[in-house]
Image (spheres, helix red, strand yellow):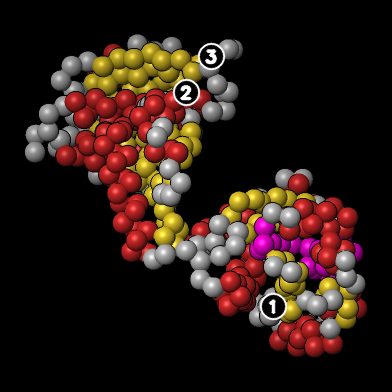
Amino acid sequence: MPSAEILTIGTELLLGEIVDTNTQYLARQLREAGIDLFYTSTVGDNEGRIAEAVQHALTRSQILLCTGGLGPTVDDVTREGIAGALGVELEFKDELWKQIQERFARFGRTPTENNKRQAYLPQGAQILENAVGTAPAFLIERNDSVVISMPGVPGEMAYILEHGVFPYLEKRFGRGAVIRTRILHIAGVGESQIDEKIADLEKLPNPTVGLSAHPGTVDVRLTAKAASPERAKEMLAELEVQTRQRLGDWVYGTDEETLARAVLEETAVRKRKLAVIEKGLEGLVIKALTGQGNAFVGGEILNVGVKTQPLKDLARQYAKEVSADVVLGVELRAGAKKHELEISIEGLSHEHHYTLSFGGHILQAPEWAVNLALSVLRRELLKESSTV
């Protein structure tokens, strides 16, 4: 199966007026279909720039998936752009115009004159039926490549992809390989430290390993490509064992598992209950833990502007007031050049108190603080001997 490329079209995307969810959706569907995706790009509603983007894409990809710009208005120029890129004219499709009229009739509407623009397609294009909307889709082959144009409306795009695009791709190119992924989540450890442990694994051609850093956490992405789901699963399992052997208990979960749930599982297995007091985070720690496990009994948000006792004293006092065995105290203090995070843990075998600094942007500081506080608590819980 050749590689694919995604081109989303729409000036509103470039202006940030709407979020491009189509690229993410298409990328995931291509992955599930075993089709490699190496490039994605966005271009505005400009005929010349669309033509240029299509021509450039076809120099490196055999499958180009375009979304957007197929409506009836003057600024919907995707058809013209693709025709220009391939050096052909637009031609009126009588059968397509009849489909458009019939579809409008089913919706209880009458097409306007400008809807006729949607019945014009590049010469040689094949119609892809859109049974859930009024914007026609099409594909046009050029040598060993194909340009596929779908509406930007997510529901219409998804329908056409499933019922028209993938059947065409399988018929023309055959079935793709199976691609499977697994994400290992790590908290409280830097990306460079992880890289030192698994650098050789990151150089593997298949399966592959990649790192993605976030404030306070790092994701290790494992990807396997094989001829069958069973073999891909085996390859992932083997790679995960190797990776976990290197990283140990740095790994707190996989895929959709959260750090908060991992913390509460460690709390529950020790038959403890956890409460939180926090300051300067607007309840983010409490919010993260809420609904993630029965070991969390609640928390209290302290006012930033009110002078209070030291955090460790407040944690100790709060432990006496609530039915909790462990209290996590967290305070984020924003500064001009760096931000300080204070963490106090009450109720374990000995007192834990930390003051850490963060030199990143203030907008990233809250997420960093929550993840770091939870990872510190998890680390200390792991050190405690289980009572089970």
Q: Residue at x 27, y 21 (%)?
A: 345
Residue beneath disc 3: 338
Residue 381 image-quadrant placement: top left
Residue beneath disc 1: 128
Q: Residues within 10 Å of mark 3 (few under 14, many from 20)?
A: some
Give coordinates of residue 22: x percent, y percent.
63, 58
- Helix, strand or loop at disc 2? loop
Say whether marks 1 and 3 touch (CB < 8 Å).
no
Would residue 321 be seen by someone viewing this image from the given angle?
Answer: no
Q: Please report the bounds of the magenta region as a residue range.
A: 61-81
Residue 131 image-quadrant placement: bottom right
- Helix, strand or loop at disc 1? strand
Q: Residues within 10 Å of mark 1 (few under 14, many from 20)?
A: some
Q: CA distance from mark 2 to mark 3?
A: 15 Å
Name the kind of residue labelled 2 in the image: Gly
Give coordinates of residue 161: x percent, y percent.
61, 70
Residue beneath disc 2: 280
Q: Residue at x 74, y 55 (%)?
A: 59
